[in-house]
Amino acid sequence: MVKIFNDQLLVVTKKMKSKKAFGPDGIPNVALKTAILVLPDMFSIVLLKTETSEIATWRWVGTKQNVADEATKWQRLPDLGNDSRWFRSLEFLWQERNNWPVEPFTTGTTKEEIRSHLFHHRVVMKPCINAEYFSNWKRLVGTVGFVFRFLGNCRSKVTGIQRNLGPPSSMELQQASNYLFREAQRESFPEEVAILLNRNATTKALPKQSAIYTMKPFLDENQLMRMFGRISRCEYATMDAQNPVVLPKNHHITKLLVRDYHERFHHCNHETVINELRQKFRIPKQRVAYRNVRANCQKCKNQRAISQPPPMGDLSKVRLAAFYRPFTFVGVDYFGPIMVALGRRSEKRWGLLVTCLTTRAVYIEVAHTLNADSCVMAIRNFMVRRGVPNQIFSDRGTNFTAANKELGATLAELDQDKIVQEIVGPNTEWCFIPPASSHMGGSWERLIQSVKRNLEQIRPRCYLSDEALRNQLIEIEGTINSRPLTHVPADDPDAPVLTPNHFILGSSSDLKPAALLDDSALALKRSWRNSQVEANIFWRRWVRDYMPNLTRHTKWFSEIKAIEVGDIVVIVDPDHPRNCWPKGRIISVNRGKDGKVRSAAVQTAIRGVYERPVVKLAVLDVRRDEQVSHNCGVPGGSVTTPRSARLTFWSNTMDVATSHVESYMTDYRAVTTVTYQQTMTGNINY
């Protein structure tokens, strides 16, 4: 006959209508699930379901004598020795039945209903800390170290070890690192780890398709998978050098580790970083993994950012204005300074170059100073000699720093408004190119280079006088205007080459033989017609021989992604170190007639708004406002995270947390209960 002993007096007297094993106080009683079976020849303890038992089978025993409490109710580690009562069972069971305790009750039934209760038990299979939430290796290791310290401090009441306080020790950090390495290995190489764990029980080998097959991996005393090296006999090599830890290439933990080494060596010394990693770790395709980390490093991307100019645009109409008077459309620029001698002292002079944008002819005038009055007089002298132009193109003065720093510093004081007011009339328009866009003024920048080269060749060692300087500049003007615009025709090698002087003087050098003057009416009429014919001949040659040379593209061939409003850019300044280049945000763009962005306005944090061409703007690979508003995953913010986006992130986070607080608290209580029991029994796997 089977007898079941229990220390709950009321439960034994109940009539089990619901067949649910719960105590009278509504708390799930695990003791009801365990019973002592009295067999004729032996005693054993088994797990018995109350649904299959009868009331007559149950007998009462005192609480202090109930052996089942050794498994369910304990405040210290249970005694599981051979002579403990867990194995000997109740003492009176070794005696005759007549000596058993008398039951203080009579079996009967009760009308009270047994109410059911829910006990939530959840097994957490995921790691306690998700490495995907971290972007820094040291912060991740420190967090895991504090978690292990918390578990150790919870166990200190049982083990009697003093609680640890303060920053994590090196042993705790090494323990946390080993835990992270094991998690990365088990997630990326689950089959290999399972085979190595059961190597003693099975003879199954690693598959040859495995990425670590050639490394001959094994598990060390910390359950870390290491590569079997061949230098174990070297007494100077460490354990990590002899048998490095195997890490997966694409795991997030590996990326954080490689990034930490990359930052430790200041984002450079790449071969040193690879060598240092090889001293402790073995990563399949290590160089590929390191290149991926470098490609995703924000600081490296900022340092590698370069300007991406759009394809070359079409030439403006003024460059193709055939059959117009020379110097109808001109470009103006300064060059210098040039030192001249005045008695025993020396002074500075500057040169004003005016070039015809169509015929490429030049006019050079000496400017004694760089104030507005001197600039106006030089331009008016040009108008008197060459005629009033329809359009004048120039820069805004800041690009003069490319010629000379002193020139740029002085030109900043020019009164541009006064100059424009004096020069511009009903038939004249002054147009400015964007600042720091010397490529847009290449028509006159290239000719200034030619003037400087000629001036260096003919200028003596001593300073010139004003008169000598003026003479030299005029000589250089004639030399440049006599340069050929096209190549010698292949079909007629003796034919003259087209030059700018053909449009100004009618010949390349104006060296004409002397002739008698015929002032008759017929001769004047014919000479006028001949001059018109000669002029048309020059322009037709210009269209036929010179214009086709303007159609070719010399650079900027590929299409690029256009700069957009909101992009974060760096303003390229070749005169300053890269670390001094200002950063800013694009607030507006200017498109050319072909629809491509040619310049943009940049809002900086300190220096205000800059207008710069696209070739002087390097776009940084960072997120913009639109991306942040849709996926605001960085509540801390950055240069691209606006305050409104951060507020939206925290608002949404609080709403989600409030709506799920009950379910979170239920899971937390259940997991905390299980984790605490595992901690006290030492079943946590590090």
Image (cartoon, rainbow, N blue to C red):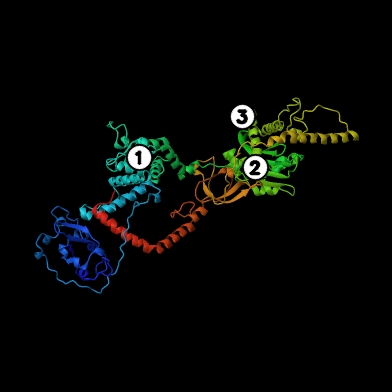
| Residue under pointer 1 | 246
Determine the CA span between mark 1 and mark 2: 54 Å
* Amino acid of disc 1: Val
Q: Secondary structure at mark 1?
A: strand
Around disc 2, counting alpha carbons within 10 Å, would you say few (fewer than 14), some (14 to 19), or many (20 or more)? some
Image coords of residue 210 (percent x, y): 38, 39
> Where is the N terminus found, in terms of image quarters?
bottom left
Circle 3 crowding by C-alpha within 10 Å: few under 14, some 14–19, many from 20: few
Residue 623's disc number: none
Question: Element under label 2?
Answer: loop
Work out whether mark 1 precedes mark 2 in sequence or the reverse, and give the earlier one: 1
Residue at image location 58% in from the left, 38% down from the top:
404
What's the residue type where badge 2 is placed? Gly
Q: Earlier in the sequence, mark 1 or mark 3?
A: 1
The residue pinned by badge 3 equals: 462
User: CB atoms at circles 1 and 2 under 8 Å apart?
Assistant: no
Foreground: 673 or 32?
32
- In the image, 659 versus 100, the foreground residue is 100
Q: Earlier in the sequence, mark 3 or mark 2?
A: 2
Give the foreground label among 1 and 3: 1
Q: Which residue corresponds to the image point at 28% horizontal and 53% vertical from the top-left? A: 151
10 Å neighbourhood of mark 1: few (<14), some, or many (≥20)?
A: many
Q: Residue furthest bottom?
A: 111
643 on left or right of 222? right
Q: Which residue is mark 2?
A: 313
